Amino acid sequence: MTTADDALLADLKRVLGDRVRADSAERALLRRDASVFDGGSAGPTCLCESTEEVQRVVRIALAHGRSVVPRGAGTGLAGGAIPLGAPVIISLSRMNRILEVDTDSRIAWVEPGVVNLDLTKHLTPLGYHFAPDPSSQQVCTIGGNVGNNSGGPHCLAYGVTNAHILAIEVVLADGEIVTLGGLDAEPSGYDLRGVFIGGEGMLGITTKVAVRITPNPPSVRTLLLSFDTPRDAAATVSAVIAAGIVPAAMEVMDQRITIAVENYVNVGYPRDAGAVLLAEVDGLPDGVDIDAQRISDIGRQHGATDVRQAASDEERMLLWKGRKTAFGAVAQIAPNYYLHDTVVPRSKLADTLEEVYRIADEHDLAVVNVFHAGDGNLHPLLLFNGQEPGIYDRVHAAGAKIVEASLAAGGVLSGEHGIGVEKQPYMHQMFSEDDLDHQERLRHAFDPACRSNPGKVIPVGHSCADIQSLRNVPEEVWG
Amino acid sequence: MSDFAKLVGAEGPVTVVGGRTRWHVGGEVRPDAREVHAPSGVVSYDPAEMTVTVRAGTTTTELTTTLNEASQRCALPERGGTVGGSVVIGENHPEVLGRGWLTSSVLQVTYISAEGKLIRGGGPTVKNVSGFDLPRLVVGSLGTLGLVEEVILRTNPIPPRSQWVESHDADPFAVASRVLRPSAVLWNGASTRVLLEGHAPDVAASLNSLTAIGAWSEVDGSFELPQHRWSLQPAELNGCSGTFVASIGVGTVWRDEPQPRPALSPSVIEISTRMKNNFDPTGRLNPGRSAF
Ligand SMILES: Cc1cc2nc3c(=O)[nH]c(=O)nc-3n(C[C@H](O)[C@H](O)[C@H](O)COP(=O)(O)OP(=O)(O)OC[C@H]3O[C@@H](n4cnc5c(N)ncnc54)[C@H](O)[C@@H]3O)c2cc1C
Ligand SMILES: Cc1cc2nc3c(=O)[nH]c(=O)nc-3n(C[C@H](O)[C@H](O)[C@H](O)COP(=O)(O)OP(=O)(O)OC[C@H]3O[C@@H](n4cnc5c(N)ncnc54)[C@H](O)[C@@H]3O)c2cc1C
């Protein structure tokens, strides 16, 4: 601990009292997020409880020449919340109040620390829900959803987070408070609200959000289709979309993950299927029956060996429980996993999946696939034992190949997890220097001095100001 | 370098002419600005992917025809003008509830920068969070940040049935509680028109459900919309009077006179000014016009 840090801590404590944490246990915890990336170095953590506190902390950090990193639940998978250069960590998890629900206008004002599923639970008795439903929804926060423009199984029909946010109160990197967007139909000016979403904490700190709330559909049909191969499942997904049906969700799981889930929660998935497709349609009763029948027919035309429709709500919940506990199930079969996230055109799903299996084989790694197939959003999980010497090199090498294969198929780097530090080295494969330069210009309009979550997204070496603000950290600070 | 990039060049004031249907939005272009046209034509269209790649100078009429041939449509308004003009104007289709928001439907944008360089933002797939969101910045930017050459748009299937219905006695604000997903609820003070879309039995069921709040008859289409759009909060619409058509649940109101420009907060103006200066330091893109 240095004098410089003593002064910073003293200033922060004057505002937050014991809600500033700087002990070594806390710092070790907050060095990481849910990604496989080794942590950076955390400065003091501030558990803010109001916009004004966030503003004051940002100004104190600024005065001490330190950058800030906003943090929700830390479930990000791209390293977006990893602190680089001992920044002040601003935790929003205590700002977790649902401020206002207006069912007439179908909006809710919430604080950023509200847990995604808590919001939907709050809305359920009113007949509404918050549509983005990341698989991590039991823990991840609305602020994190906005930060990463998160998706989820039901974003196929409903759209990702960006389609569900009307206005955002932000504390900018210089401490100014600004409201982006608005509740009116088409707010004038540049769409700064739209641009901010998916900004990974680099455009400012979200302190309040107006979200759109979605009425619960009166009828839902959930189907489980079994196939001999993932290729048949993928072909069915493409064919359903091509037939002009946009289901609420279409999720594919391969055999390995299906068996793992069965062993873990026993929800009745077929162990002998090469892949299963979980498809859901919602809306009015007649229409959902028509679409469920068509999906079933299309599945059979593409080799479905079995089609099961949930007969009750309980059975429906059970089928979803299997999907939603998939990551927990994986933890039972491997000590570590690396969850990847790329998108390819739907017509390339089957080929790319085969390529993923080949790449895993080539690197002597086990891989399981459970993914948002309807959007072409692949989620290969590379399984490994982190204790094995040199394993991380192999895992990252395989990951690089998966990214390459996805781009070669006409895809993109990330569908929902973001770039963070994970995909930063690949940005050049998707964008030219000039493209990246323009992304940087966008970023600088919000944060000219690169004080908010520096060192992410834009490749290092490109972003001079970022390097500057990372270097500004006094040598002797914690790390 | 693309032909359009050469045309735009790296120096001197320049503006893109589309269909001139929204030519005066955001102020008058400076008379010394050189007028250029964006290239036109549908580049590629794969209905099964639900995406279309289209050059900015293409008319929305041509795009609509192409999409309709595959029983699809998109979020762009279909009332004349060009794809590029519609994207940079950023207004939504009057049936936005059924079509989706324009800003969510622009997946990738290719534009020429003030320095005359070809810049690409976003990606070709329906889902993408790779880097900062340049497409959303360009939508509604009025051609002040970059001149659009080409976009990739999300498309959607045309529902099996579409039916407009009208009522003279129903409360327009009660429609939402009767119909799950109306594609449009328009009200002109005297009557309400609702666009019901989906499978035929669902449309019939929705119409049936609507009879609880009034008497309805089938009509051929929407109201004639006045020229100018106002952006209000959905909750403010019941105060509308005079000649107007209001989109209930959305907040858009069409009127004969333009909406006075709402004042933006100083912080928003500051960010917007920096944005403009960062993208167009010499102020050569669509000079005279401002998006904020
Ligand atoms: C098991 C598992 C399953 C997952 N499934 C999905 C899925 O289906 N879909 C999906 O999209 N993601 C998924 N994720 C990833 C992750 O849960 C999401 O990205 C989530 O939205 C992150 O929320 P968080 O609160 O944990 O944010 P954090 O991890 O704390 O932060 C994420 C990013 O947002 C920034 N941020 C956080 N809060 C704020 C704020 N208030 N203001 C400004 N910036 C902020 C951070 O700086 C960081 O860059 C999954 C993760 C796990 C572990
Ligand atoms: C009577 C009528 C009513 C209409 N109502 C609506 C409505 O309610 N909602 C709606 O959305 N549309 C409506 N439209 C259509 C709308 O005007 C056009 O679809 C579009 O918004 C403007 O396109 P344009 O090609 O005519 O643009 P122009 O009027 O030619 O140009 C508008 C602006 O965009 C700039 N621009 C044009 N192309 C580019 C480019 N490639 N790159 C950068 N800048 C560019 C121009 O320089 C100019 O500043 C209506 C049209 C008519 C005729």
Image (tube, coloured by chain):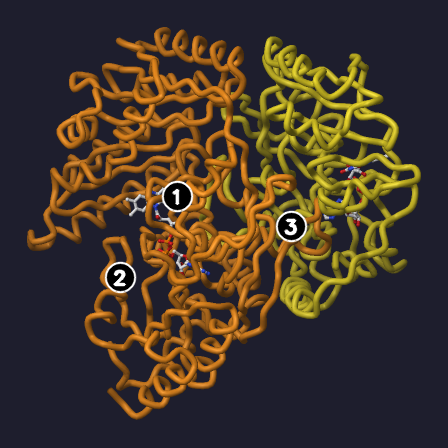
Chain colours: A orange, B yellow
Answer yes or no: is residue B124 visible. yes
Q: Are marks 1 and 3 on the same chain?
A: no
At a point 68% along the width and 33% down the height, the residue shown is B96
Residue pointed to by mark 3: B138
Residue pointed to by mark 1: A117
SS state under label 3: helix
Which residue occupies the foreground of this view, B236 or A346? B236
Q: Are marks 3 and 2 on the same chain?
A: no
Locate the N terminus of chain A and report the quarter of the image it occupies.
bottom left
Mark 1: amino acid: Leu
Indicate which disc residue A32 carries. Answer: 2
Mark 3: amino acid: Val
Per the model, the C-alpha gap separating discs 1 and 3 is 33 Å
Q: Vertical placement of B200 versus A199: above or below?
A: above
Q: Chain of mark 2?
A: A
Q: Are marks 1 and 2 on the same chain?
A: yes
Q: x, y percentage for residue A84?
A: 33, 70
Mark 2: amino acid: Arg
